[in-house]
Image (cartoon, helix red, strand yellow):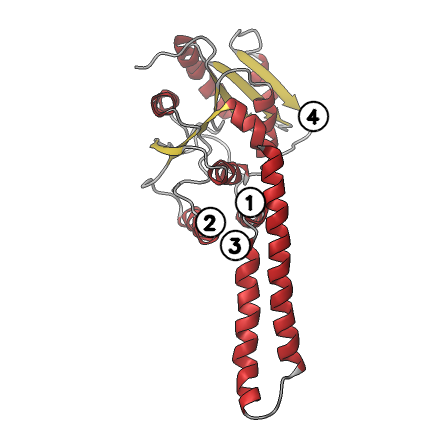
Amino acid sequence: MLMSDQKTLTVIIPAFNEAANLELLLPQLMEFCSKLGFMIIIVDDGSRDNTREVLSRFSDQPRINLLHHKMNRGYGAAIKTGISACSTEYAITFDADGQHVIEDIERLYNRMVQQDADLVVGSRQGLKNSSYRGFGRTLIRLIAKILMNVPVHDLNSGMKIYRTDLLKKYFHLAPDNMSYSDIITLVFLNNRHLVLEEPISIRARKQGRSSITLETAFHTVMEIINIVTLFNPMKIFLPISLLCILTTAAWGIPLLIQGRGVSMGTFLGIISGLIFFLLGLLAEQLSQIRKGISH
């Protein structure tokens, strides 16, 4: 076992309507963190059940920092609030629904320190999901891989350990909603940080219902497109440009061979393709300027 220095790691738990699960989770988590010298930050994201009341029972514990949002602001926003209050070298996100195994915190921490990584993703690869959620995860990963190089299997795992300074540097690029987990991983990958995966275990949710829906998957796909446009815009604009030009050529060349000239549709299609290409070049220049400023 790799023991930590005092206050080396903070466990950040975003919580929304998870009173029943937190009541079971926190005593075990507190005992575990006390042994290893880890800290805990819990962010109540405007819960409408008795989450705040449950958390108040632990307010006198020296290793726990309790934070509250007046209104529900989203999963990502709750993590950002926790990270902003974090003062340790490393931070790990841990879901409040009771599905994560506490001992995996130490597993990810050990991998982080031993490999001098910047982000370690707790990978649920090989674990069974419902067909609905499994299809959604597969689709999101497929879209991400089409648009960029993604060597990570489990993009949307809620259990990840980060270097706190890097996370504070980048978290403004990630959204406030459930797609935070996917996007922050893509941000680390795009900035060429060392991102690793470590297998973790997952248990069935004991209480309550998951807030992940089809709308969550749609938002995640849109955020992936946004982040790719931010870091590598030609991945978006160049295929669109080529599609316009090639489709137009396939339509217009036969007409030209038949001696019917160049149609207005052909002309507009080629112009559209060139416009998309030039927009891509402009976006690429803006992306390079932004990268220069951020570094």
Q: Amino acid at mark 4?
A: Lys
- Provide the residue designation for mark 2: 148
Q: Residue at x 57, y 82 (%)?
A: 252
Judging from the image, what secondary structure is the residue with disc 4 in? Answer: loop
| Residue 194 appears left or right of 69 | left
Q: Amino acid at mark 1?
A: Phe
Asked if residue 280 is positioned above or below residue 220 in the image, the reply reads below
Q: Residue at x 65, y 32 (%)?
A: 72
Residue 117 percent coordinates (x, y): 40, 27
- Provide the residue designation for mark 3: 235
Q: Quadrant of the N terminus?
A: top left
- Provide the residue designation for mark 1: 231
Precedes in sequence: disc 2 or disc 3: 2
Label 2 – label 3 distance at C-alpha: 8 Å
- Provide the residue designation for mark 4: 70
Residue 110 percent coordinates (x, y): 35, 21
Neighbour tally class for label 1: few under 14, some 14-19, many 20 plus, Cα within 10 Å? many
Q: Nearer the viewer, residue 79 or 190?
A: 190
Cβ atoms at labels 2 and 1 below 8 Å apart: yes
Residue 274 percent coordinates (x, y): 62, 66
Label 2 – label 1 distance at C-alpha: 10 Å
Q: Nearer the viewer, mark 1 or mark 4?
A: 1
Precedes in sequence: disc 2 or disc 1: 2
Neighbour tally class for label 2: few under 14, some 14-19, many 20 plus, Cα within 10 Å? some
Judging from the image, what secondary structure is the residue with disc 2 in? Answer: loop
Cβ atoms at labels 1 and 3 below 8 Å apart: no
Q: Amino acid at mark 2?
A: Met
